[in-house]
Amino acid sequence: MTSTNHDTQPLAYNGYHRKLTAEADLFLCGVTRGTPGGEYHRRFWQPVCYEYELTDLPLKVRALGEDLVAFKDLSGRIGLLHLHCCHRNASLEFGVLTKNGIRCCYHGRVFDIDGRIVEMPGEPAAHKLQHEVSQGGYPTHVFSGIVFAYMGPPERIPVFPTLDRFAVPGLKHVPGIRLELNCNWLQIKENAVDAHHTTILHVIPQMRGMDHFAEEFGNDMELTWAETPAGVIYLGVRQVGENIWVRSAEIYGANIHQINSIFETGQERKQASLPFMTFWTLPADNDRSVNFFISHVGENEAMPFEKRRELEVFGQFTDRPYRERQLIPGDSDAQESQGPINPIALEHLGTQDRGVVMFRRIVRRGIQAVQKGQDPKGFYLNQSDVPATFANDRVVARSELPDEAADPAALRAFGDKIARDYLQNPPMRGFIEKTLT
Ligand code: FES
Ligand SMILES: [Fe+2]
């Protein structure tokens, strides 16, 4: 073919007519101080580092576009302060840890973990100045080896949400590793409800001879989605022999998502499956993010943990040879390649992208709520208000389908039915109640 008639073939060879760039949607994606999105993220506990990263030296951290220093003082208390000293702006990454906080390397001011000045060596006006100024600081909370910070208004601090799945008996919560991605936070979170990719991207390793996700992920899947009290879930319905396997993952609040085992095969019938991983995504800057995670490890896992860890982080950060990434791309390759801030105005969404659309709507509503002085979805002042979670694998007999019909519409309707059931009977409840009775 040498040419194309643009009138009769408008879609062929239309590179010349396609738009190449679009403005980033910073209302939706922005994370820095004083912006609508930045204020939104400052209503949630943000992961800033792993506790094991706090050693005998301070740790420089970037969070929500701010330079910070995290440290554990010699009394074992954790602090998170603005990086630049309030005296003459030297960086506290060069500070010295003390029993009562951190000492700036330049003129020796010591800051408590809440930022108040506790020492001003050689300063005759110390007593007065100490009451006039402090170093910016944020409250911290440690959960399962991850240090979280609340960077929002101190008058209204939400509870750190302890999710129902963390109370499932017999589980160990093993802190992960820092997964750094050169892209905006939103494209990382969206991936969790963009389930369509699990049947394509995560099947490539098998096609190329690598054992990664279970083979059954390649089975045809019908998708449905549901809004949950704290976020959104997808339900992917697949046939596996005589079974129907319904898999769900959830985005919870702005920055949490939970997935179930990547080794699930759908062969064994079950109402609920053990939690597998929980992720918190830190928006470091508009175009840089860090995933922190814990692995939920059951008592009788057949796979040695080192092997599991290797597989669960495969493709989750781009520190691999380029050729290998091209041959077996992972989530991080797809996510980073969307661009530093995915230009969503250039997208052409299909019917399988409903979860992405639902999540963006939740985020926009949350940003608008904060603009109006209200609390966004996913913000809770009390633990008793923290809703259930819904990431699960349910595997039932095919005979549970009405008429045993397994056409796409029937499978989607079955997914909707399971979603309604989950909202009445959260799947983790079974595990927890079993041990209470
Ligand atoms: S710059 Fe920190 S004490 Fe002077
Ligand atoms: Fe994925």
Image (cartoon, rainbow, N blue to C red):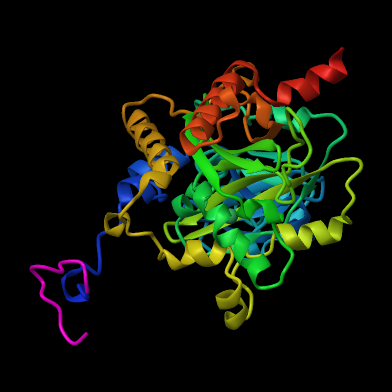
Task: Report the residue at 82% width, 45% height from top.
Answer: 75
Task: Report the residue at 42% width, 57% height from top.
Answer: 286
Magenta segment: does it hold 183?
no
Decide: is 255 above or below 415.
below
Asked whether, in this view, residue 313 is left or right of residue 327, the answer is: right
What is the chief secondary structure element of the magenta stretch?
A: loop
Decide: is 378 above or below 116.
above
Q: Nearer the viewer, residue 197 or 120?
A: 197
Magenta segment: does it hold 2?
yes
Residue 229 screen position, x and y as percent: 52, 24
The image quarter in which residue 105 lies: bottom right
Ligand 2 located in image quadrant = bottom right
Residue 405 screen position, x and y as percent: 55, 31
Can residue 353 be seen in the rendering of this structure? yes
Residue 257 screen position, x and y as percent: 59, 42
Pick out the residue farthest to the left: 7
Q: Nearer the viewer, residue 435 or 224?
A: 224
Magenta stretch in the rendered image: 1-12
Decide: is 146 above or below 335.
above
Q: Quadrant of the C terminus?
A: top right
Task: Report the residue at 45% width, 68% height from top.
Answer: 337
Can residue 135 be seen in the rendering of this structure? no
Task: Report the residue at 71% width, 61% height from top.
Answer: 212
Q: Nearer the viewer, residue 69 or 101?
A: 69
Q: Quadrant of the N terminus?
A: bottom left
Asked whether, in this view, residue 240 is left or right of residue 63, the answer is: right
Q: Nearer the viewer, residue 71 or 320?
A: 320
